[in-house]
Image: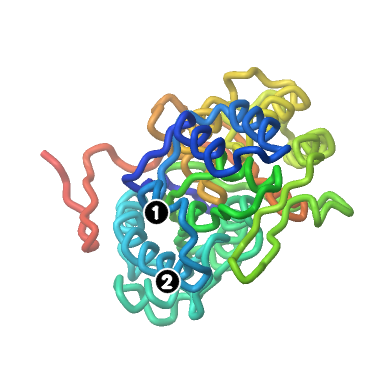
Amino acid sequence: MPTLCKPSVSVPEYVVTMEETLESARRLHAGKPQLPLALRLIRNTGVRKRHIVRPLEETLRHPGFEERNRIYEIESKKRCPEVVEQALANARLAARDIDAIIYVSCTGFLMPSLTAWLINNMGFRSDARQIPIAQLGCAAGGAAINRAHDFCMAYPEGNVLIVSCELCSLCYQPGDDGVGSLLSDGLFGDAVAAAVVRGSGGTGMVLERNASYLIPNTEEWISYAVRATGFHFQLDRRVPGTMEPLAPVLRELAADHGWDVGNLDFYIIHAGGPRILDDLSKFLGVDYDAFRHSRATLTEYGNIASAVVLEALRSLFDEDATLPGATGVIAGFGPGITAEMAVGSWIADAPKNLEFNPKGRVATLP
C-alpha cells in the first residue's frame, strides 16, 4: 500500500507579527469603513506570526504583476531544491527513484511548470510524469496526496514526489479594501513543503482510501479575481460555516472504511482559520486537542495554503508518539468549495540502525 513519508517544510527568513500586520492595516487603510471589521477578524485568526519572502516594506509596495511573477520564479527555484532533497532523504530514496512529480501552487504561474526545472536540475529521470496542480488553492495539498495515492495504486512499485510552493505574500494587494482581501493580508503566510508517497516500504501514513467532494453552488465563495495587478483573493462570509456540510462527508469516508471518524488516533486538517477547526472538531465530536498540529501551524505560520497539511503532518512525525497501526485522517479544503480527504494507518518499517545517503546508498550505523 502507498505510504506518505515524513514531509520537509521550509519557511522564509522574514517574519511578520500580528502586531505589525495590524499596524500596517491601520496605516494603509485608514478611514475605510470596513477597516474596524477587518482588524477584528485579523485579531481572531490566532496567527501569532507569518514568514514572507521579502521584507515587509517591500511586500507592502506593489511592483506590478510581471515583477511579482518574476520574483515567484526566482524564489521557487531558490527554495524548493533543499526541501525536495530533505523529503527524498526522509523517504530513503534518491531522485532517480521518483516516477511522478506533483507540483502544487496557487500563488504564481510558470509554464513549463517547475516540475520541468526540477527534472533538469535535480537528477530526476526524464521519463518522470509531471502533474502540476494550479487552481485548487488550499485544497491542493490534500489533492496532491490523493493523486499520489491513485498513481501508486496504478503503479504499485512507483514513487511520487509532492512539492508545494506557496508564496502568498506575492498576492498582497495594497489597493484592495475589500474585507476578504484585508483578512487574507493578515492570515496567509509563505512556505515550501515536499513529501514522498512510496508505492511500497517507508515509514508514515499508509494511504488506504481517499475521496473528493464539492459543496454544490459554492464556487464563488473562495476565488481569485485576476486583474492587471494580479490575483485578488475573494472570500464569502459563508465560508466558515462550510464544516457543517463537510463533516458528514468525512464521517461517511471513515465509515466506508469501517472506522468511526470521531474515534481516530490522529487528525491532519487544513488550518484555514480557527473557526474551521473549532467547527469541525464539534461536528466530528473530537477533542479540541485532536487538531493540535493544525492549530500550531496556523499560530506559527498562518494559513500556508496547500502546504498546511504537509506542515501539520510533519509536526505529527516530530511528536514521535504515533504507534504502528494508529488510524488517522487528512483533509484539505479550498475553492469550489472542495474537500480532498484521505484515511489511513501508521506504519514504521525502517530499521533504526540505517542511515540514508541522498546519493542513493544506505549505510549501517555502528
Q: Secondary structure at mark 1?
A: helix
Q: Which residue is mark 1?
A: 58
Q: Is residue 78 visible?
A: yes
Disc 2 marks which amino acid? Arg
Q: Residue at x 53, y 69 (%)?
A: 65
Amino acid marked by disc 1: Glu
Asked whether, in this view, residue 127 is left or right of residue 366, the answer is right
Mark 1 or 2, closer to the camera: 1
Report the residue that reaches farthest toward the front.
Answer: 31
Tell me the number on the disc at residue 145.
none
Q: Residue at the right extreme?
A: 217
The earlier-in-sequence mark between 1 and 2 is: 1
Classify residue 338 as left or right of residue 168. right
Q: Are circles 1 and 2 on residues that touch, CB within 8 Å?
A: no
Q: Quadrant of residue 30?
A: top right
Q: Residues within 10 Å of mark 1 (few under 14, many from 20)?
A: few
Q: Is residue 347 visible?
A: no
Q: Report whether 124 appears left or right of 353.
A: right
Q: Is residue 314 above or below residue 145?
A: above
Q: Which mark is residue 70?
A: 2
Image coords of residue 243 (percent x, y): 77, 35
What distance separates the C-alpha of mark 1 from that of mark 2? Answer: 15 Å
* Left or right of 264 on screen, residue 241: right
Residue found 30% across the figure and 70% down from its top:
122
Does 161 sit above or below residue 174? below
In the rendered view, would you say 7 is above or below 295?
A: below
